[in-house]
Amino acid sequence: MNNTNKDDNLENTEDFIREIISKDLLEGKYNQIITRFPPEPNGYMHIGHAKSAFVNFSLASENNGKCNLRFDDTNPSKEEEEFIHAFEKDLKWLGFDYGHKAYYSSDYFNQLYSYAIKLIKLGLAYVCDLSQDEIREYRGTLTSKGKNSPFRDRAVEENLDLFDQMKKGRFENGSRVLRAKIDMSSGNLNLRDPVIYRIMKIKHHRTDYKWCIYPTYDFAHGQSDSLEKITHSICTVEFEDHRPLYNWFIDKLDIYPSKQIEFARLNLSGTVMSKRKLSELVVSNKVNGWDDPRMPTISGMRRRGYPSEAILDFCKRTSITKRKNVVDLSLLEHCVRENLNKSAYRVMAVLNPIKVVIKNYPDDLVEEIDALNNPEDLSAHSRKVPFSKEIYIERDDFAEIPPPKFYRLTIGKEVRLRYAYIIKCVDVIKNERGEVIEIHCEYDPNSRGGKSADGRKVKGTIHWVSALQSSTAEIRIYDKLISEEVIDENDIDNIQLNPNSIKVLKNCPIEISLSKASEEVHYQFERLGYFILDSKDTKLEHLVFNRTVSLRDSWNKQKT
Ligand code: ATP
Ligand code: MG
């Protein structure tokens, strides 16, 4: 039970959990490794959970073991069926195989109840009538010892009788609790007679009204691990101080000793990762549901277009350590880009359009220009893109007074239209405020495909969409969810949503082939980023695209 201490010297090495497990296997301590992923169904799965699931499922599969999915559903006041289904769906989408069934802590309510009886009979648990506030007051602090409850020395028979009455619903919520009798002067607050059962006269999503007393997380978690014969119970470092308590239960109840190993939570810059905070954002409508593409939830990331492989790749690349750390969002985005670069279909769309009229192009001509679907994957072939006299380009691909090193369109200069022709700006039309509203150009008919016949150099290439032979879409551009870094999750009450976390662009011209876009396909809008159809808000006549990620990779830049 105290065997974790010997492993402490491993804790500073990368992937120390793997090393502990290999060592245990080498020493023949276990026949089979069993881990578990134990979410509390009080919110949706987020990337931190994905990291934990990744660690647990990979450790099991690498060692021919198994990993249980167990819902820690001991607190019926916060838990809902919806969250269970969402977790199952997200885990499957990520490819984690939890066997044919999920486990539930609530399956062990009978067993946990008999463990409580056993502790009472051993003189190691008592019914306490102090109020919640009094219990807190008696507990003391890190610097002062606690005080024994006046009910601590109740006789075993009286405790059994009172606990039975608690179970039968004879007492009001909060009027009594069952506490473990450990040590009110322990330096570890978790050992100062923790509450192990409380009265909660509410319906449980699985056991209905069968129980009106429920075990606390601390009483249920370790014992559930033990009942499932979990060999390595991997959790996050907040539970390090709970380990002596879990070991006390295991020792006194004389049950299977699962070995708890802690690692640092995954934190991600630009977002928050606590279900409580995420739930607040959802309930207050600050975001558009748990699957809002800005959320760090797996459902949000799926809707935004993050491929599951990229999320797994990210989980793999973030190391397992004991030290608190914040991973930069740019690493996750880098994984997404790397994956999408290989698979995404290249297309053209314009986010902020300005019209270009090609004066010397025949009025009624529409040419079908060949465009590559994916230069990274030539089996993806090419498609035809219509080209005509009037096209749209990005407003900022034109500058009347170009800054230095501006290789795009400006008066008197040439630029290449991707896959099409070289054009030269000859004039602009302005409105009464002096703003350019239309650009007039001439094209070089001998430059189809983008190459000049006389070999003259044209540096810039810009994307475009034919003005008539095109479609339109709403395009949503996302930025990080919160403005400041939240390293201490206790500070989350004061964080502010990034006011620019979403930008909605309406009526953006998109190339005509996108009018048949599929929800399953990832697109690269050339020069703009990776996009996917929004699975919720897209209607037949109203396409909505989410920008998954831009093309600029700040992770690579950081490394160089
Ligand atoms: P939250 O505040 O998000 O609800 P939690 O730890 O209370 O976090 P649980 O549903 O209890 O959420 O977590 C299920 C499992 O996922 C636990 O083993 C937990 O340690 C792990 N986990 C949760 N968040 C993270 C994270 N950010 N990084 C790594 N593991 C995490
Ligand atoms: Mg929790």
Image: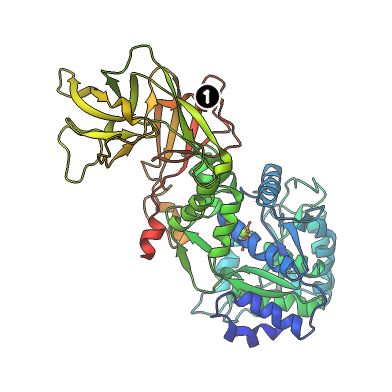
x and y percentages locating residue 219 in the rendered image: 72, 66
The answer to whether residue 181 of the structure is visible from this angle is: no
| Quadrant of the rendered image containing residue 378 | top right
Ligand 1 contact, mark 1 (Cβ < 8 Å): no
Amino acid type of disc 1? Ser
Question: In the structure shown, which secondary structural element does the residue marked by tag 1 occupy?
Answer: helix
Colouring chosen for the image of the structure = rainbow
Neighbour tally class for label 1: few under 14, some 14-19, many 20 plus, Cα within 10 Å:
some
Image quadrant occupied by the N terminus? bottom right
x and y percentages locating residue 249 in the rendered image: 74, 75
The answer to whether residue 84 of the structure is visible from this angle is: yes
x and y percentages locating residue 432 in the rendered image: 15, 17
> Between 498 and 327, which is closer to the camera in this rendering?
327
**Residue shown at the point (42%, 53%) measured from the top left:** 270
Question: Is 357 drawn above or below residue 98 in the view shown?
Answer: above
| Quadrant of the rendered image containing residue 51 | bottom right
Question: Is 521 drawn above or below residue 539 in the view shown?
Answer: below
Q: Quadrant of ligand 1?
A: bottom right
x and y percentages locating residue 109 in the rendered image: 81, 59
**Residue shown at the point (73%, 82%) measured from the top left:** 24
Give the residue pinned by disc 1: 515
> Between 215 and 349, which is closer to the camera in this rendering?
349
> Between 383 and 53, which is closer to the camera in this rendering?
383
> Between 507 and 399, which is closer to the camera in this rendering?
399
In the displayed structure image, the side of residue 420 where residue 50 appears, left or right: right
In the displayed structure image, the side of residue 175 where residue 350 appears, left or right: left
**Residue shown at the point (36%, 65%) measured from the top left:** 560
